[in-house]
Image (cartoon, rainbow, N blue to C red):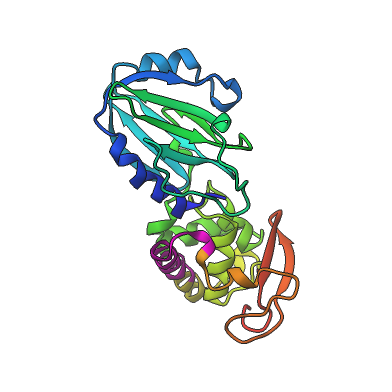
Amino acid sequence: MPEILEIEYYRLGAVPALRRTVESVGADDAWYLKRDTSAAELDAALVGERFVDARRHGKVLLLDVSSGVTAGLRFGMTGRLIVDDDAPIRELEYSSARDDPAWDRFVVHFADGGSLRMRDPRRLGGVELDPDIARLGPDAWELTAVELEAATAGSSVAIKARLLDQNRVAGLGNLLVDETLWRAGIAPGRSADDLTRSEIDTLATTVRSTIADLFARGGSHRGDLHDERAVDGRCPLDGAALRRDTIGGRTSYWCPQHQR
């Protein structure tokens, strides 16, 4: 479930890992290494080096290395970051409540005895060197109306599906998109190219404000709509019965009363 907010917490949590010499790397799960990145390549790129910066684009955590490469970390549905046994997020919504070290898929051991770990029960995340960020859409945290208009132009797919497409807008997940569309008053099943310029402006502003608000509250699952995501859920705004539909392959909750 990690969305842009959770990855930002991971980015902040990675700061204590900066400027510490890497002694060894544990990357035994070949499935977890993406785009032909190998354990040997990770060793060559990281051992004896240091992370010099922690950045984020959408849902990708980017750790710049003193050797000149960048390690890209994707967390899938259940991945968490742990640095020196300190986890910015202790438990993820819809993930296991257990915390098993056997789920450590990528481990960086530092010369001072500390570590950076990716703990991922379902193995849906991954690690790669020099990820191709250019193929991703603009980062949702700073999404402009111009960028959103470009992402929706000429597309008859549902606006929710368009917002979930990381190649169009980077960082949004199911919970954030439902919350944003609910706040913006836009039905998730509407065709993306059906939105007016005024609605595009409103939606872009709402994407940014929703992200900022929920970040301050502690994560993507802290939205006003979240507690009503159930069969008998009611709209927190007007009390209408929520609709539950599958849109863009994801379970979607929305209010037919005020979302048009």
What residue sits 42% from the left and 52% below the top?
139
- The answer, for residue 189, to whether it is visible in the render is no
Is 223 or 82 nearer to us in this picture?
Answer: 82
Left or right of residue 106, residue 159 in this image: right
What are the residue bounds of the magenta stretch? 203-221
Q: Where is residue 151 shown, x and y percent of the image?
A: 52, 56
Q: Quadrant of residue 234?
A: bottom right
Quadrant location of the C terminus in the rendered image: bottom right
| Magenta-drawn stretch, dominant element (helix, strand or loop) | helix
Tell me if residue 110 is in the magenta stretch: no
Q: How many marks?
A: 0
What residue sits 44% from the left and 56% below the top?
140
Q: Is residue 113 above or below residue 249?
A: above
Q: Where is residue 206 shown, x and y percent of the image?
A: 45, 70
Q: Is residue 209 above or below residue 110?
A: below
- The answer, for residue 171, to whether it is visible in the render is yes
Is 100 or 203 nearer to us in this picture?
Answer: 100
Q: Is residue 245 above or below residue 167?
A: below
Q: Where is residue 235 shown, x and y percent of the image?
A: 63, 80
Residue lying farthest bottom?
Answer: 238
Q: Where is residue 143 shown, x and y percent of the image?
A: 41, 59
What residue sits 65% from the left and 86% below the top?
239
Is 223 or 140 nearer to us in this picture?
Answer: 223
Is 97 or 244 nearer to us in this picture?
Answer: 97
What residue sits 55% from the left and 51% below the top?
92
